[in-house]
Image: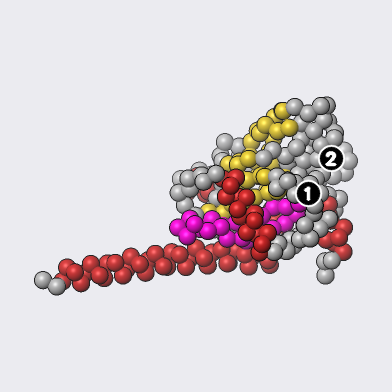
Amino acid sequence: MTTMPFMNVIFRLIFVLLCLSASSSRAGEGARLADAFEREVAVKLNVPESAQARYAFMLDAALKGGAFSASQYLILVDRNSNVQALFIYFLDLPAARLHFIGASPVSTGKPGQFDYFFTPTGVFAHTLENLDYRAEGTFNKNGIRGLGLKGIRVFDFGWAMAERGWDGGGRGQMRLLMHATDPDFLEPYLGVARSKGCVRIPATLNVFIDRYGLLDADYLQALENGEKMWMLRADRTPTAWPGRYLIIIDSASRERPDWAPLPGKRRAHKP
């Protein structure tokens, strides 16, 4: 007579322990990646907790309560000319929390020349419709390796409508990429708008996103299904919670925050 109630209690305890284990695993994952970011990303920003919380709020607003089925990593870019920064957050879905992982300076679109766009805002999915590729490391006519060193990944988000930065403006299509850039001539200027509309990021950040598969949910699923994904790293160590979304906002900041210094000042303070 007492067996069934006792077994129900046991099952409930097992369920609670499994839930606690999963929660602990998610929290541990966020902490692990934050530590890895600190070790592996050479060019980063020291964002105070108040700003971390503010950007988490802006990220949530940009997503507009979108329905997510699993915890995952999200990449947020503030294209504002006074900020020019990328933030990585881990969405812990059951806990309804956004955990800050790290931030780095970027360069987005600089208007004023032909074929230069304002980087578009919105939520952009990283899907198999626009396959990534690897930079060839070749120099253009100006002696610049626009996509960075040979072998570094180019994240392709497909065609996007954006505001033209020349000839009176208006809307037009541009290819939205997130990529590294020339390590000698352009990476030192990350933190100011200088691109044709793409998001330029530090090489070590590119490798970090690539190695841990932060945006590779669709790619890793395809790999599991038996498809050949040649663009994935051979030495990848993907997270258990990969994401697929790049979110670009404009914070409308009217002055440059102390934690996002101009490139020259940032270099001057490097140890």
Expressed as whole percent of the image width and height from the top left, the position of residue 50 reads: 66, 62
Secondary structure of the magenta portion, mostly?
strand
At 17% across and 68% down in the image, what residue appears? 4
* Residue 149, x across and y down, in percent: 76, 50
Report the quarter where the N terminus lies. Answer: bottom left
Q: Which residue is mark 2?
A: 140
Q: Is residue 248 left or right of residue 226?
A: right
State the residue in front, 216 or 86: 86
Q: Is residue 115 above or below residue 12?
A: above
- Could you tell me if residue 61 is visible in this image? yes
**Is 100 part of what is drawn in magenta?**
yes
Q: Residue at x 21, y 69 (%)?
A: 7
Label 1 residue SS: loop
Q: From the viewer's perspective, tell me whether residue 79 is left or right of residue 61.
A: right
Task: Give neighbour class at mark 2: few <14, some 14-19, many 20+ (Cα, 10 Å).
Answer: few
Q: Which residue is mark 1?
A: 254
Secondary structure of residue under mark 2: loop
Residue stretch rendered in magenta on the structure: 82-105
Q: Amino acid at mark 2?
A: Asn
Relative image position of residue 61 (x, y in whole percent): 58, 47
Question: Residue 145's quadrant in the figure?
Answer: top right
Looking at the image, residue 144 sits to the left or right of residue 212; the answer is: right
Q: Looking at the picture, does residue 105 appear above or below residue 226?
A: below
Residue 212 in the image: above or below residue 7: above
Q: Is residue 211 visible?
A: no
- Which residue is at 84% across, 40% downward? 140
Residue drawn at x 76%, y 51% as measured from the top left: 83
Q: Nearer the viewer, mark 2 or mark 1?
A: 1
